Amino acid sequence: MDRKARDEAAYLEIVSAGVDKGAALRSVAECFGIPREEVAAFGDADNDVQMLQYAGRGYAMESGDANVVAGAEFVAPSNDSDSVARVLEEL
């Protein structure tokens, strides 16, 4: 779903209790034996916050929701400027 559609009041996302992107990322990292400190994640919306908090390098996209950007330790350039690739090259 594109960002414009998500900004509409009719958008609703429902998941089971305890299910979030942070828990999923932790599960994948543990499965592959990757230490948390070596995990990078990128996100731009409220449902990405737990994932960004789990990752050793959690990047909010500069063009993301203001509260996500404000709470992030790292901020990547806007997602329309190859920012993920640019950050990964730097890492």
Image (cartoon, helix red, strand yellow):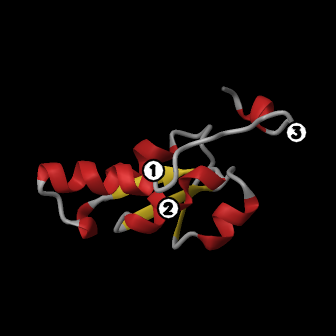
Amino acid type, mark 3: Ala
> What residue does disc 1 label?
21
Instruction: Report crowding for label 1: few under 14, some 14 to 19, many 20 or more residues within 10 A (C-alpha).
Output: some
> Element under label 1?
helix
71 in relation to 4, above or below: below
Q: Which residue is mark 2?
A: 50
- Rendered location of residue 32, percent (x, y): 13, 49
* Mark 3 → mark 1, Cα distance in angstroms: 22 Å
- State the residue position of label 3: 9
Q: Kindly indicate the quadrant of the structure image that contains residue 80.
A: top right
Relative image position of residue 1 (x, y in whole percent) = 66, 26
Task: Answer whether residue 38 is visible to the viewer in this image.
Answer: yes
> Which residue is at 63% across, 48% downward?
78
Q: Which mark is residue 62?
A: none
**Residue at the (23%, 54%) spot, across then down:** 29
Tags 3 and 1 in contact by the CB under 8 Å rule? no
- Gap in angstroms between the C-alphas marked 1 and 2: 6 Å
Residue type at tag 1:
Lys
List the single residue furthest toward the right.
9
The one nearer the camera, 63 or 41, is: 41
Mark 1 and 2 residues: CB-CB less than 8 Å, in contact?
Answer: yes
Compared with residue 57, is residue 46 higher up or lower down, i.e. above or below?
above
Task: Indicate the amino acid at tag 2.
Answer: Gln
The answer to whether residue 86 is left or right of residue 16 is: left
Image height check: is 78 above or below 75?
Answer: above
At 79% from the left and 32% from the top, the residue drawn is 4
Helix, strand or loop at label 2? It is: helix
Quadrant of the frame with the C terminus: bottom left
